[in-house]
Amino acid sequence: MNDSKEYVAIETKFKMTTDHKLDLLSIKLDEIKEKQEEMSEAVSKVKEALYGPDEGLYARLRDLESWKKNMSKVIWMMSSTIIGLSGYVLASILDKL
């Protein structure tokens, strides 16, 4: 009789700890699911910041490259104009001498 009571007590204790562990596991899975959803939102925000067609990082980079290309053309035009004007002034000064 005493053995059967101990067996029932052990079985009940085991069942309670198993149920407790399953509940804890369920809670942890819910927490993981919430964190995964948060990560998904964060990744979509980063993706939008990088690939946004108007304000994304790649759009800004494309605009900067376009500006650099145009400024390079302007600088070459100004440099050649200054060199041409310098040559004209130098030629004018040499003709008067």
Image (cartoon, grey):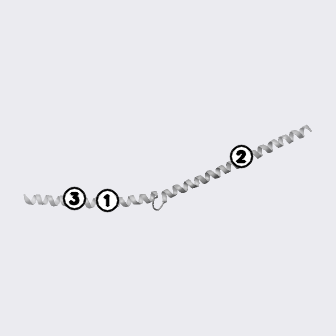
Give the x, y percent position of residue 83.
21, 59
Residue carrying label 1: 72
Give the x, y percent position of residue 92.
12, 60
The image's mark for residue 24 is 2
In this rendering, would 65 be left or right of 8? Answer: left
The image's mark for residue 82 is 3
- Mark 3 and mark 1 lie on one chain; the one further toward the N terminus is 1
Q: Which amino acid does the dot numbered 2 rest on? A: Leu
Q: Secondary structure at mark 2?
A: helix
Give the x, y percent position of residue 90.
14, 58
Q: How much space separates mark 3 and mark 1, taking CA atoms?
A: 15 Å
Residue at (68%, 48%) from the top-left corner? 28
Q: Is residue 35 above or below residue 55?
A: above
Residue at (53%, 55%) from the top-left corner? 45
Q: How much space separates mark 2 and mark 3, taking CA atoms?
A: 79 Å
Residue at (15%, 59%) from the top-left corner? 89
Q: Residues within 10 Å of mark 3 (few under 14, many from 20)?
A: few
The image's mark for residue 57 is none
Q: Which amino acid does the dot numbered 3 rest on? A: Ile
Q: How much space separates mark 2 and mark 1, taking CA atoms?
A: 65 Å
Q: Secondary structure at mark 1?
A: helix
User: CB under 8 Å between callouts 3 and 1?
Assistant: no
Q: Residues within 10 Å of mark 1 (few under 14, many from 20)?
A: few
Q: Which amino acid does the dot numbered 1 rest on? A: Ser
The nearer-to-camera label among 2 and 1 is 2
